Image: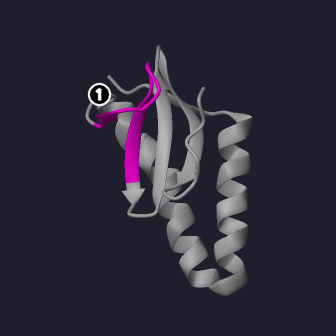
Amino acid sequence: MTLHVVWTQNARLDLLEIIRYIAERSPGAARAVKSALDAAPQAAATAPYLYRNGRVPGTREIVVHPNYVIVYSVTDRIEVLNVLHSRQCYPSE
């Protein structure tokens, strides 16, 4: 069974900020990172518990690249909560 993937507004804003930052330096790299970040939750949709437990209870994490982590929760769908740079402070909720 494949779950539906939903991105929260916070996650979309995180993604936009990351891609804008990278694009200022390398448009090609920005496209590659965006593609990887967009695709990662789709893998979780088919195997939601494949990825590690999150630092916040009730969440899970996908390390998409050594620098980027997608935080999501599993209910009747995959809800992407945040996209974080590995050096960024982890949100408490």
* Residue under pointer 1: 49
Measured as percent of width and height from the top left, residue 42 is found at 43, 42
Residue depicted at 49% across the width and 32% down the height: 72
Mark 1, secondary structure of its residue? loop
**The magenta segment:** 51-63
Extreme left residue here? Answer: 50
Residue 6 in which image quadrant: top right
- Colour scheme of the picture: one colour
Residue 62 included in the magenta stretch of the image: yes
Observer-nearest residue: 24 or 32?
Answer: 24
Observer-nearest residue: 33 or 45?
Answer: 33
Observer-nearest residue: 25 or 43?
Answer: 25
Residue 15 in which image quadrant: bottom right
Which quadrant is the N terminus positioned in? top left
Position of 9 with respect to 52 (left or right) is right
Measured as percent of width and height from the top left, residue 37 is found at 50, 55
Which quadrant is the C terminus positioned in? top right
